[in-house]
Image (spheres, helix red, strand yellow):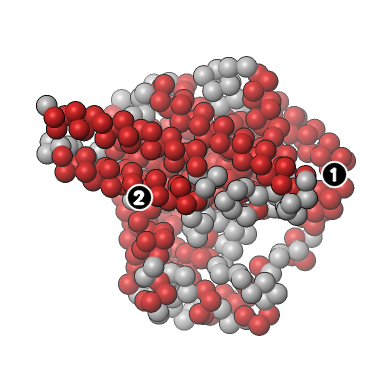
Amino acid sequence: MLKQESIISIDKIIWWGILLFLASLILSIAVVQIVSLLLIVLWLIKLFKNKNYKIETTPLDIPVLLFIASRLSGILFSINHEVSTPAIWTEIIFYFLFFFFTNNINIQDDFRNNVMIKVFVVAGIAASIIGIAKYGFGFESRASSTTSGYYTFGMYVTVLIGVILALNQQKEIFPKRWFFIIAITLTMIALMFTFNRIHWLATAVLILVYGIFKNRRVLIAAVTAAGLMLIIFPSVLQRASTLLNPLSHTSERATLWQGAIKIWDEKIIFGFGLDTFTLIFPFKNDLIDKGISNWHNDFLQMYMECGVVGLIIFIYLAVVIFSSIIKILNTKHINSNLKNITWGILLAMVGFYVSTIAGGFLSNPIISLLFIYLLSILALISKYRLSNG
């Protein structure tokens, strides 16, 4: 009896820990990492205490395990183990949160699903207000959060916009229409003030996807809003105009990619190893920003760090993600709540993968955690689809 009460207490702590994870994700990297590790430890304690515990499996487990294995190979076959090994504690250990979430979230519990979404949205709105204020009062030249720079913040807000759009008709999330209007307005303004062209592009693509396949009025509203922003804010118009000639405004990415072309054939199978960019990049002296530490393209990053094996697995994971989403959206027996959440994940994944063109999430401690969380929710909905087919 005492053991059962102990397990129930652990479950309660885990639930509040998940909410704290979502609330602190964009507000405090220290808090979210500590919470992430504590959640994994609590789950292990739960496994130890409950001898009859059955680990839940999902259709995405194998692709995720292959992805983790490919990242581990980037340590095993690294040209410098001393540089690559710390990634176990800074990156790889957090990928196991996927299995924590799939074993501790009940995707059929609509109440808890809605609470998690609300916490994520409210935290994102709070971060957007902070970012707008920091830019508006001149504290920063570009909007950012309390714990990250403008790139991470822009990626986070892009994903958040996708989720807000997908759930805009869900009364449990937006009981009043004005709440949705405030949420989408603040997040769009925050994104605008990051001046991240790749995230502007990613958001435009996800809005286009949602507008074509779900709600065409969104396209009209988005085009109107974008036009007003370009008229009201000349600095935004000036930044946006550089998209007309992207090759002349790559922010040193052209130099990075030229460097990759120069050495692409030196470690084809398993790559150079994790976090080896500064060791192998051939044109260091040509970079204006000496703090650059990755390849600014996740597919290229995966190839350079984990070779063609890692790249194939990374592409395979993307194929599984989008094919799983399409299957869910085409399934009739899944309720509207889960389909709306799946739409949110679809738009988020569009944002993630479009952003990999000139950036990405592999090396980002905040965005990679957000990716893992959404991936786990997708895995749970996929399992529900199969088990109720």
Q: Is residue 188 left or right of residue 35?
A: right
Is residue 37 depicted above or below 117 in this figure? below
Circle 2 crowding by C-alpha within 10 Å: few under 14, some 14–19, many from 20 = some
Q: Is residue 354 visible?
A: no
Quadrant for the C terminus in the image: top left
Question: Which secondary structure lies at badge 2?
Answer: helix
Q: How many marks?
A: 2
Q: Which residue is mark 1?
A: 233
Residue that numbered label 2 is attached to = 37
User: Gap between marks 2 and 1, in whole Å?
Assistant: 43 Å
Question: Who's the residue at 52% across and 47% down the image?
Answer: 28
Task: In this rendered view, identify the residue nearer to me: 83 or 357.
Answer: 83
Image coordinates for residue 357, horizontal then vertical, percent:
60, 57
Q: Is residue 249 at all visible to an observer of this figure?
A: yes
Mark sitting on residue 311: none
Viewer-proximal residue among 28 and 56: 28
